[in-house]
Amino acid sequence: MIYSMTGFGKCQLNLQYANFNIEVKSLNSKQLDTNIKISSVYREKEIELKNLLSTKLKRGKIELSVWKESSEIQNSHKLNIPLIKNYHQQILNLKKDLGIESDIFPALLKMPNILQKDDAKLDNDEWLEVFRGINTAVDELIQFRLVEGNKLEKDVILRINLIIDFLEEITPYAKARIERVKENLLNKINDLKINNIDENRLEQELIYYLEKQDITEEKVRLKAHLDYFIQTISSESPNGKKLGFISQEIGREINTIGSKSSDAEMQKIVVQMKDELEKIKEQLLNVL
């Protein structure tokens, strides 16, 4: 079972005094990268939210957004009464000194800093509801990841099985190639018309050269890596990085087979194997 790193979840809360729209998105990333957009009144809860995202989502580029819409008219500013009184007294004193008669009220409203921002306070009951909503959105994202992961898993296993089929196709060509290489070597030695050849030494050299051309060990290791890949992808825990490491080992064995394949048909099969492996690696970039 694998999970995609791409996902989306949302939740809408309709509370007594406010409505909340909660969204959480995730994209592929090598590490956990969180970006939290939330009202300043909840800033002290950011660490709690990061721990939640880290525990539940493990990895990916995560963006959490919480928008609050008040369902009642709220005044976020209030008049600075002491400052207004101070301005008023100064203006009265100035009017008396200058002997000016005018309405000073409009002037007072234009003086600096007469409005004070009324700092909002954290409502614990409201926060509990918001936190539950965030959990709901995250759970929806996880379900989204699972659905996408199932699609990725089917595609990746299909391509792994294609590589296994190609590995079987290459076997008869590999056997025929060894016999052909052996025959060509003997023909070349005969063409040289060298007398007094040490037959034992010649046989040893032939065996050594043919062992260098043999791909039996590479085939065995490649099949073992392919089987381990399928076993790993079926496990319960997130395993995107592990699958990436196994795919690297698969690539090494395919490259070694290719370097030993002096046969044109074998080379064609190796190219097909490499093509399927590259498609697998692209998919694994998005696996949790």
Image (spheres, helix red, strand yellow):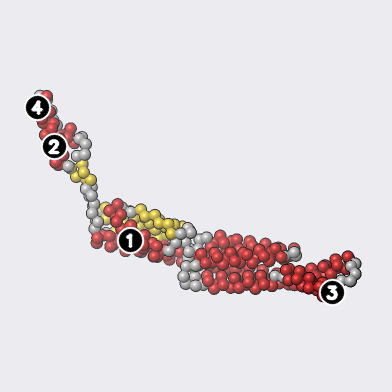
Percent coordinates x, y for residue 112 in the rendering: 21, 36
What residue is pinned by disc 1?
Answer: 48
Which of disc 3 and disc 1 is earlier in sequence?
1
Residue 265, horizontal then vertical, whole percent: 73, 65
Q: Which residue is mark 3?
A: 199
Sequence-wise, the earlier of marks 2 and 1 is 1
Label 2 with label 4: CB-CB less than 8 Å: no
Tell me the residue that label 4 is attached to: 96
In the displayed structure, does residue 236 sit left or right of residue 41? right
Residue type, label 1: Glu
Identify which residue, 198 or 115, lies in the foreground.
198
The picture places residue 139, in percent across and down from the top left corner, at 39, 65
- The kind of residue on which mark 2 rests is Asn
Q: Residue at x 13, y 31 (%)?
A: 91
The residues tagged by marks 3 and 4 sit, at their Cα atoms, a distance apart of 130 Å
- Rounded to the nearest angstrom, the CA distance separating label 4 from label 1 is 60 Å
- SS label for mark 3: helix
Spatial CA distance of label 1 from label 3 is: 79 Å
Q: Looking at the image, is 101 positioned above or below residue 114?
A: above
Residue neighbourhood size for the residue with mark 4, other residues' Cα within 10 Å, grouped as few (<14), some (14–19), many (≥20): few
